[in-house]
Image: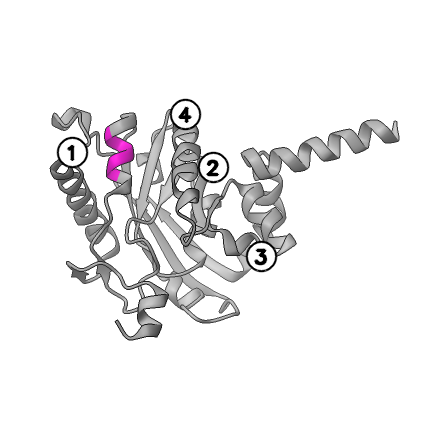
Amino acid sequence: MLDTVRQWAVKARGDWRAHGTAYELVRILTAPARRLLVRLRVVGADNLPADGPVILVANHVSFFDSVLLMFALPRPVAFIGKAEYTDNRITNWLFCGAGMIPVRRENPGDLSHVFEEVADVLRRGEVIGVFPEGTRSRDGMLHRGHSGAAHLALTTGAPLVPVGIVGTDRVLPTGARLVRPFRHATIRVGRPIDVQASGLTKSTKRARREVTDRFMAEIRRLCAQRYIDQYAPTPRTVEAGV
């Protein structure tokens, strides 16, 4: 009996890390803290397709954004996240168990591996979340989107669902270590964008830019951030004064 339990535990731990099958357990365990810490309102949740592959594209103003999106919508959402978040045993269990796909930006080999994992998520008919700005906004503005999400949509046929997040920068501001409780936040879900219905079937540079600009305009409408047609600086370039 004890051996059976041990075998199950080993398999479950592997599943949590590889496939996020601990999602429901993590959702239940973190629910009290999430409800206590944030007064969250979700608008337009019915715009999220009930089944099939989906690519969520959202603005990014706080580390807390991915945490809320993972659990606040009707369907589980997997996210690409910095591998540094998983260096701690607790956060490794929490984020990988919820379905996060870790990537180290400084390791080029990670990027191709992550793209394959994301494609697998979509092939399974699941939801992947992407922050097209590439990093959190540190100036409060919505920055030019990178075209990776558009490439995914063009190559897989999955619809893009724009999302506007408001207020999480007051819940957990950039640089803060502690959540500020009892703050209000809103998630606004827009209507799906079917790139193939627009006649775009190949992932060309022009098509990727067209699709990216289209969903960034929708994100801007949903979150009401001021838009700047420049890529968001990464923490490294900020520290270097670039």
Amino acid on which disc 3 is placed: Ala
Mark 1 / mark 2, whichever is N-terminal? 2
Q: CA distance from mark 1 to mark 3?
A: 44 Å
Q: Which residues are magenta?
A: 150-154
Amino acid on which disc 1 is placed: Thr
Q: In the rendered image, which residue does mark 4 sit on?
A: 125
Give the crowd class for mark 1: few <14, some 14-19, many >=20 residues within 10 Å: few
- Estimate the x, y position of residue 59 in percent, counting from the top left: 30, 53
Which element type, helix, strand or loop, lies under badge 2? loop
Which element type, helix, strand or loop, lies under badge 1? loop
Q: Residue at x 51, y 56 (%)?
A: 84
Amino acid on which disc 2 is placed: Pro
**Viewed as shown, does residue 72 lie left or right of 225?**
right
Q: Residue at x 51, y 40 (%)?
A: 99
Q: CA distance from mark 2 to mark 4?
A: 11 Å
Residue situated in front as seen by the camera: 14 or 29: 14
Mark 1 / mark 4, whichever is N-terminal? 4
Q: In the rendered image, which residue does mark 1 sit on?
A: 204
Q: In the rendered image, which residue does mark 3 sit on?
A: 33
Which element type, helix, strand or loop, lies under badge 4? loop
Amino acid on which disc 4 is placed: Gly
Q: CA distance from mark 3 to mark 4?
A: 30 Å
The dot on residue 86 is none
**Viewed as shown, does residue 231 lie left or right of 174?**
left
